[in-house]
Structures are given as C-alpha cells and as structure tokens.
Image (spheres, rainbow, N blue to C red):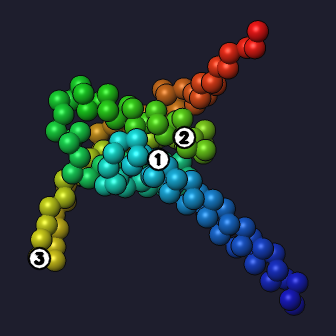
Amino acid sequence: MRHRRFPWLATALFGVLLGCGDLKDIFSLQRGLAQEFQTNAINVNLSNSAYLTIVFSNSAAASLPDSERAVFARRVAEFVRDHYPQYQQLSSISVGFASVRGGGGFSISRTDVPYRFTPAELGPPRQPKEATVPKAA
C-alpha cells in the first residue's frame, strides 16, 4: 500500500520544486527591474506560467504623455526579454501603473494595465555584448 502513495508524493514534491524555481526567477526579475527603473514599488505577477504582468505603483512614468509612457512600457518588456530566464515560455508581458493612496488603515488604488507585448513582437533575447580585449602585439 505504501508504494501507491509514493508516485503522488514524488509528483507533489516535483511541483513544489518547480514552483520554487519560478518564484526565484520572478523575485530576481523584480529586483532587476527595481534596480533598472530605480523604484521598489513594482509588482510582478506570473499567471499560468505564461502571462507576466508588471505594475509600477505611484510611478512618475504614469503621468508621462501617452507616447513616452508607451516607450517606457516597451523598455520594461525588453528588460524582461533580456533578463527573465523563462521568457520563451511567456505568451504575453503586460505593463501598467497603479495609483495607491491611503491612510488610517485603508488604501484606495486604481490600476491601469494598457500595454501588452508578445515575445513575437519583442523578438529573441539580446545577448550581452562581450568585452573586447585588445590583442597583444
């Protein structure tokens, strides 16, 4: 009877370990985005291992003119393309902005996620440029 439970346990353990890898990659992506865009107010959400959503809270970029905000959103998606190991498995990358206000134990937020990019639109990840070392004479 014990041997019948083992495959279920092994499958469950494999799922947990796989989930931890996704979580580690998402956490690393969030830290990279925070450093690149100089804010910690970034929420990164992965749904069904295929739909990545990035929301900047109270970001100055939210008040940019539409054309500049679109350029900013594309830069965010390109950062994902070049730094997220699971990029090829994504169906879409959505970028948005949230306005969060509150006090006295409550908050009010308004979130708008108007930008969506697919890996087909963004292309393959760019390889980092290799440092050129002068050849010895």
According to the picture, the residue beneath numbered tag 3 turns out to be 104
Are circles 1 and 2 on residues that touch, CB within 8 Å?
A: yes
In three-dimensional space, the C-alpha distance between marks 3 and 2, rounded to whole angstroms, equals 39 Å
Residue type for callout 3? Gly
Element marked by disc 1: helix
Report the disc number at residue 107: none
- State how many labels appear: 3
Q: Which quadrant does the C terminus fall into?
A: top right
Pick whichever of labels 3 and 1 is earlier in the sequence: 1
Quadrant of res 123: top right
For residue 10, above or below residue 49: below
> Residue at the location (86% across, 89% down)?
2
Look at the image and tell me whether residue 52 can be seen.
no
Mark 3 or 1, closer to the camera: 1
Mark 1 or 2, closer to the camera: 1
For residue 99, above or below residue 11: above
Q: Position of residue 124 (x, y in %)?
A: 58, 28
According to the picture, the residue beneath numbered tag 2 turns out to be 83
In this view, the residue farthest toward the left is 104
According to the picture, the residue beneath numbered tag 1 turns out to be 32
